[in-house]
Every structure is written in structure tokens, then in C-alpha cells.
Image: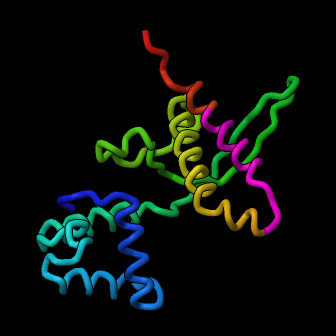
């Protein structure tokens, strides 16, 4: 991508495409953009160098390779002198939001590390906020409130912030 398009620009381009074609079809959209030979407003969004595009695609495949790998974690909590063991499934790796702008990779979760779990809570909060933005309309349509999800996102943010190293 040589140039970034704003959210508003992309929205207008997609609206126009859907109006012209009766809906969204990613393959048809890509073909339309490619066949424009640089005249389509979304042309700058794509990587047209074959080697660079193939590399980016292979990196995406590598990211997908770890997607969905689940590990069963054993969590021990001491409550009034009693040890309570809970088994929870979770991802093997995660992508800390703080690393994303720099092309950072995935990290293996370490449930014994406050820093690792804080970063994981940060990712969870980011994903939950994304879910809220995407599905708020559906939740309201179903006659429910989004407040519980917002409260959970705030709790995850607080846990993430508490795990961050303190500046000297």
C-alpha cells in the first residue's frame, strides 16, 4: 500500500461498489480495481509488485498458521486458605496491541507472568472494544444493553494498566 485511504474514503468507495453491483464481493472488487490500471480510487490500497504481494500473502499465511491453536491452562487461586483449581482454554499465542504499529509478532502466553497476562488483557480489551463497535447495533436490536461488555472491557483495561511497568 503506497497510500492510506481514510475511513470515510473507503466507506464511500464500498458504498459506490455495493450500489453499482448489488452488494459486496471482494473478488469482483479486486478485479475491478486491478483492471482499472491505476484509475480506481482504491488502486493505491493494493500491493501490485508480484514479489512483494506474494511475500505479504505468505506472512499472512504464517500468521494464520498459529490462529486458533488452543491450550488448556490450569489456574490456581487461593481463596480463604483453600486452593481452587480452574481449567481454562485459551490461545497459545496472542498479538499485544502495543507491538502492532512496529510489525511486532505474536507472543506465547505465560500465565505465570503479570506482564504477559497484562498484555493479553490489553489485547482482550482491544478486541472487545472492536466487538462492541461492530455489534452494538445488533445488541440493541436484540433488546439488550451493551453495558456489561463495556464494564468487562474496562476491567480488562484496568488489569492491563496495573501490569505495566512503572516509569522511574
Q: Position of residue 151 (x, y in %)?
A: 73, 42
Magenta-colored span: 142-157
Residue plotted at (59% across, 24% down): 162
Residue plotted at (77% across, 41% down): 85
Residue plotted at (56% across, 26% down): 163
Q: Compared to 3, does 35 lie above or below?
A: below
Q: Compared to 77, does 105 lie above or below?
A: below
Could you tell me what secondary structure mostly forms the magenta stretch?
Answer: helix
Question: Hey, which quadrant is residue 8 in on the image?
Answer: bottom left
Question: Hey, which quadrant is residue 139 in on the image?
Answer: bottom right
Q: Compared to 25, does 13 lie above or below?
A: above
Residue plotted at (59% across, 56% down): 133
Point out the image quarter for the N terminus.
bottom left
Here the colouring is rainbow
Q: Is residue 13 magenta?
A: no
- In this rendering, the count of numbered labels is 0
Q: Residue furthest bottom?
A: 21
Point out the image quarter for the C terminus.
top left
Q: Nearer the viewer, residue 80 or 152?
A: 152
Q: Residue furthest top?
A: 168
Amino acid at each position: 500500500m503506497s497510500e492510506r485511504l481514510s475511513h470515510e474514503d473507503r466507506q464511500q468507495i464500498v458504498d459506490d461498489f455495493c450500489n453499482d453491483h448489488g452488494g459486496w464481493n471482494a473478488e469482483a472488487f479486486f478485479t475491478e480495481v486491478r483492471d482499472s490500471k491505476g484509475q480506481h480510487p482504491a488502486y493505491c490500497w493494493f500491493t501490485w509488485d508480484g514479489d512483494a504481494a506474494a511475500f505479504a500473502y505468505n506472512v499472512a499465511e504464517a500468521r494464520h498458521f498459529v490462529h486458533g491453536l488452543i491450550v488448556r491452562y490450569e489456574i490456581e487461586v487461593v481463596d480463604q486458605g483453600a486452593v481452587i483449581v480452574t481449567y481454562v482454554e485459551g490461545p497459545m499465542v496472542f498479538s499485544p496491541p502495543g507491538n502492532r504499529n512496529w510489525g511486532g509478532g505474536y507472543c506465547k502466553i505465560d500465565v505465570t507472568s503479570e506482564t504477559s497476562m497484562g498484555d493479553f488483557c490489553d489485547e482482550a480489551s482491544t478486541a472487545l472494544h472492536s466487538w462492541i463497535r461492530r455489534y452494538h447495533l445488533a445488541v440493541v436490536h436484540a433488546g439488550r444493553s451493551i453495558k456489561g461488555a463495556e464494564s468487562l472491557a474496562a476491567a480488562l483495561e484496568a488489569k492491563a494498566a496495573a501490569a505495566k511497568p512503572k516509569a522511574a
